């Protein structure tokens, strides 16, 4: 899958609310062909239970979780220290 298509699919998953955080770096992503589990391990490495990730080590589900976590970090208000 071309990178642009992968990114667009991931963006659509996030915008349609199909990414759910379960806590501790674990997410459920409802894809077009099933619900998959995305995990970030203690080293920061991502993995997904979908067949595409197992074959190519990349997928729209992991990309969607990364997009979601980056957008949440940008939205957090910065606290000023006194």
Image (spheres, grey):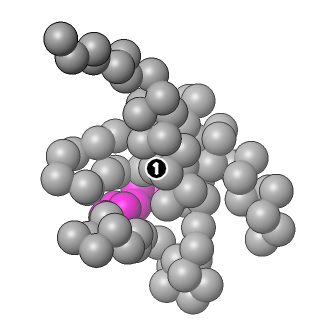
Q: Is residue 26 left or right of residue 56?
A: left
Indicate whether 79 appears above or below 42.
Answer: above
Residue sitting at x 61%, y 84%: 56
Residue at the farthest front position: 82
Residue matched to label 1: 65
> Is any atom of residue 30 visible in this view?
no
Quadrant location of the N terminus? bottom right
Quadrant location of the C terminus? top left
Indicate whether 5 appears above or below 53.
Answer: above
Residue sitting at x 42%, y 42%: 69
State the image coordinates of residue 13 (x, y, percent, origin top left).
57, 41
Residue 51 lies in magenta, yes or no?
A: no
Q: Is residue 6 left or right of residue 56?
A: right
Q: Main secondary structure of the magenta part?
A: strand
Residue extent of the magenta highlight: 34-39
Q: Nearer the viewer, residue 67 or 52?
A: 67
> Is any atom of residue 70 visible in this view?
yes
In the structure shown, which secondary structural element does the residue marked by tag 1 occupy? helix
Residue 35 lies in magenta, yes or no?
A: yes
State the image coordinates of residue 53 (x, y, percent, origin top left).
52, 77
């Amino acid at each position: 899958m071309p990178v642009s298509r992968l990114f667009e699919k991931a963006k659509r998953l996030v915008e349609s609310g199909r990414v759910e955080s379960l806590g501790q770096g674990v997410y459920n992503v409802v894809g077009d062909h099933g619900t998959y589990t995305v995990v970030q391990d203690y080293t920061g490495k991502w993995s997904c239970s979908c067949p595409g990730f197992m074959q190519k080590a990349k997928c729209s589900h992991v990309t969607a979780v990364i997009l979601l976590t980056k957008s949440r970090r940008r939205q957090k208000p910065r606290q000023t220290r006194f």
